[in-house]
Amino acid sequence: MVESQEIELAGHIIDSGIMTQLFDKVMDMGGNFEILVFDIGKKKTDPSYARLRIKASSKDKLQSILSELTALAPARLK
């Protein structure tokens, strides 16, 4: 059975490299992700927003991945 949870990120998530780091972390830990919404700011000062579904093979693995993502981007992750 696959466990999943949606997460949201907001702010300068592209130019800061957070999105790439997040994708790498999920895959490195054996999880998967699905991009549900991705709104990119039009100007340098505009924030971006993303909602993703993080998936893992077990509840424990999912919680481990989510903990790592929170440590990676605590101010941007909702």
Image: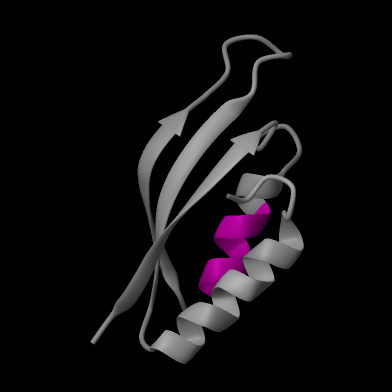
> In the image, is residue 52 above or below residue 12?
below
In the drawing, does residue 43 fall left or right of residue 66? right
| Relative image position of residue 10 (x, y in whole percent) | 60, 36
Q: How is the image coloured?
A: one colour
Residue, x 52% and y 24% (percent of image)?
A: 40
Q: Farthest front residue?
A: 78
Q: Nearer the viewer, residue 44 or 51?
A: 51
Q: Nearer the viewer, residue 64 or 40?
A: 64
Residue, x 74% and y 61% (percent of image)?
A: 72
> In the image, is residue 21 above or below residue 11?
below
How many discs appear?
0
Label the magenta part by its dominant secondary structure: helix
Residue, x 53% and y 32% (percent of image)?
A: 49
The span shown in magenta is: 21-27
Q: Farthest left residue?
A: 1
| Relative image position of residue 26 (x, y in whole percent) | 54, 69
Quadrant of the image for the N terminus? Answer: bottom left
In the drawing, does residue 71 fall left or right of residue 31? right
Q: Is residue 56 visible?
A: yes
| Relative image position of residue 66 (x, y in whole percent) | 57, 71
Q: Is residue 29 visible?
A: no
> In the image, is residue 53 above or below residue 57?
above
Per the image, is 29 magenta?
Answer: no
| Relative image position of residue 12 (x, y in whole percent) | 70, 31
| Quarter of the rendering containing residue 46 | top right
| Quarter of the rendering containing residue 68 | bottom right
In the drawing, does residue 38 fall left or right of residue 25? left
